[in-house]
Image (cartoon, rainbow, N blue to C red):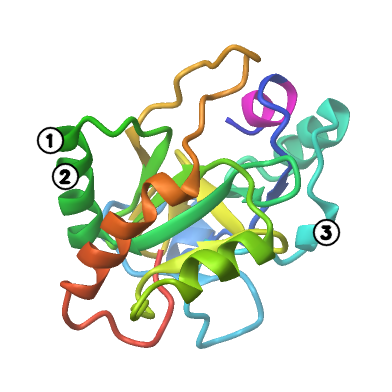
Amino acid sequence: MALTAATEWRWPVVPGAALAPSPSRRQSKQTLAEGEQASCSCPDPECAVPGAHPFDPVLLAATTDAAMVRWWWTNRPEAPVILATGGTAPCALSLPAVAGARALATFERTGVRLGPVIATPTRFSVLVEPYAIEELGELLYAQDWVPSSLRFHGDGGYVVLPPSRTGAGQARWERQPEQGSTGRPWLPRMENLLDVLIEESAATPGSGSRLAY
């Protein structure tokens, strides 16, 4: 996935902090079993997004260079694939999985075209065309209220690409990328999706304050 994103789609990627299996599994070199609890390999013992964030190298190192990407994942084949959002890369809006599933059903019912959608057991991330912070500000200013469970991943942000494994479970494509006229995946504009994503996020109780992916 890392090479496809970087070289075919020109999406800058960087390896994330992988999950740290239990000491017994490190010794036996077994892989983490489905549903088994794991901590993050980063130094934070209370990491809110284990296995789902950049660490070393940092996000600013994200690149589309094929040689660099090959070297990273040859040395760290289990590392999650982190997409650096913004710039010329996609941006994203993420929301709780229950709200995301309802939003996708609404889009299908109303005929709104979606681009790639990433799902984990806890959250959905909807990829959209790059947007500027000023554009986002104007759109949010026009809203009565935006729930904190709806998060925006623009310049300086990131999302985890499938099939990365995180503390919340394995990331997958809920909607597969579809090739556009440029050879890169087609992406919708944020303003065409925002109202529904806000409405469904606001209707989802108990989102909590800690991040989860």
Asked whether residue 202 appears in the rendered view, the answer is: yes
Residue at figure coordinates x 28%, y 63% from the top left: 122
Q: The magenta stretch spans which residues?
A: 3-7
Task: Determine the image quadrant of residue 60.
Answer: bottom right
Residue 203 point in image, percent of width and height: 16, 72
Q: Element under label 3?
A: helix
Residue holding disc 3: 60
Q: Amino acid at mark 2?
A: Thr
Q: Nearer the viewer, mark 1 or mark 3?
A: 1
Q: Are marks 1 and 3 in contact (CB under 8 Å)?
A: no
Q: Element under label 2?
A: helix
Q: Residues within 10 Å of mark 2 (few under 14, many from 20)?
A: some
Q: Are marks 1 and 2 in contact (CB under 8 Å)?
A: yes
Residue holding disc 1: 109
Q: Nearer the viewer, residue 146 or 148?
A: 146
Q: Residues within 10 Å of mark 3 (few under 14, many from 20)?
A: few
Residue 173 point in image, percent of width and height: 36, 36
Residue holding disc 2: 106
